[in-house]
Amino acid sequence: MKIRHIEAKPGERAFGYLEASRTKSEVPIHIPVNILNGAKEGPTLLVSGAVHGAEIIGSIGLHQVMKDLDLAELRGTLIAVPIINTSAFEAGTRITGFDGENMDRTMETADPEGSPSAQLAYLYLTELLPKADALINMHAGGTDSFVWYTIYPGEYGDPDVIQKSRDMAIAFGLPQVFRSTPASWAGFHTVAKDQGKPAIMPEIGGGTDFKQNGMYQIERAAQGIKNVMILMDMIDGEIETESDKVEICDGKHEIFAGTDAGIMLWECTHGDYLEKDQPFASVYHPYTGELKSQILAPDAGTVLNTGKLWPTVDQGMWLALLGDIAEVVDVDFS
Ligand SMILES: [Zn+2]
């Protein structure tokens, strides 16, 4: 497997940088890439993480997978990019440090002559994705939020690719799987799906849960990647999921804060069903502790496994996702 100058022969591992260009201070705009080429024939899986720079739980899980893989036994190739957006990682932000853009929304503006994000997206779409048979586009919560589900592009497209993406999402092993979200047009996994490659976007872990469950989050991310590799027959082993049942969800309504900012405490928890206008959270004055207002559910729905958990809120901030649990399926890959 060769990606530009980065080459790993069967049974070998290689690391290098795919460089687009440089910033005005000569900082490279590049993607650091690992190729782990198995000694045996098989498919190619691309796993990339931290397109949003603070979302690194899956990236650390990917490190573990890279360490655990036995290249003599691996069937096929793992292209592993733990940190795809280096300037966002540097800044610890969701957006690219160089230009303030959301790189996972630049698929349609990808351009070798464009902004740094557009150049990176162009590299991704021309050098990495064409080499892959399937994609895992890893996301996570930021430092103040928590997420625990896997998205697959399930709304439109080739039914066979959608079915394979759904199998990948269930195999990844988190107990909630979204077949649609309010932003389901976005992300490199949708581009992959449109090109006929099964693809998923795990949203795994996040800061507020890290103190208690950080190592578990990382292990779960690593096991998820291994599960997909078992499903693709790249490695031997048993698919180990967190639960033997998976909820297939449609993410429908986003909850945003109103004009009152301050201290915010949730009035519900993940999994609760809210009626329209039922309180989602209360906002309190930071200096007096008095109740300022309540944030209400914009429509009826179940509070899905995502959202901002840190108890402060700014005006208009994205807070949570309400949806429908469309079906509950038994996990069975025997
Ligand atoms: Zn993200």
Image (tube, grey):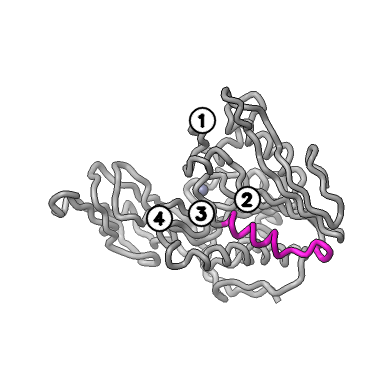
* Residue occupying the point 13% across, 51% down: 288
- Number of numbered tags placed on the structure image: 4
Give the residue type that dot 2 points to: Pro
- Across and down, in percent, residue 51 comes to 57, 44
Q: How far apart are marks 4 and 1 (CA)?
A: 26 Å
Q: Name the residue under label 4.
A: 307
Label 1 or label 2, whichever comes before in sequence order = 2
For mark 4, does the 10 Å Cα neighbourhood hold few (<14), some (14 to 19), or many (20 or more) residues? many
The foreground one among 45 and 88 is 88
Q: Can residue 177 be seen in this view?
A: yes
Name the image quarter holding the C terminus: bottom right
Label 4 or label 1, whichever comes before in sequence order = 1
Mark linked to residue 138: none
- Across and down, in percent, residue 143 comes to 43, 52
Secondary structure at badge 3 equals loop
Up-down relation of residue 31 to residue 118 (above or below): below
Label 3 or label 2, whichever comes before in sequence order = 2
Secondary structure at badge 1 equals loop
Mark linked to residue 99: 1
Give the residue type that dot 1 points to: Asp
Q: Magenta segment: does it hold 61?
A: yes
Left or right placement of residue 25 versus residue 261 in this view:
right
Q: Mark 3 points at which residue?
A: 140
Q: Magenta span covers which residues?
A: 58-74
Kindly report which numbered mark, 4 or 1, lies closer to the viewer in this rendering: 1
Give the residue type that dot 3 points to: Ala
For mark 1, does the 10 Å Cα neighbourhood hold few (<14), some (14 to 19), or many (20 or more) residues? some
Q: How far apart are marks 3 and 1 (CA)?
A: 21 Å
Main SS, magenta residues: helix
Q: Magenta segment: does it hold 308?
A: no
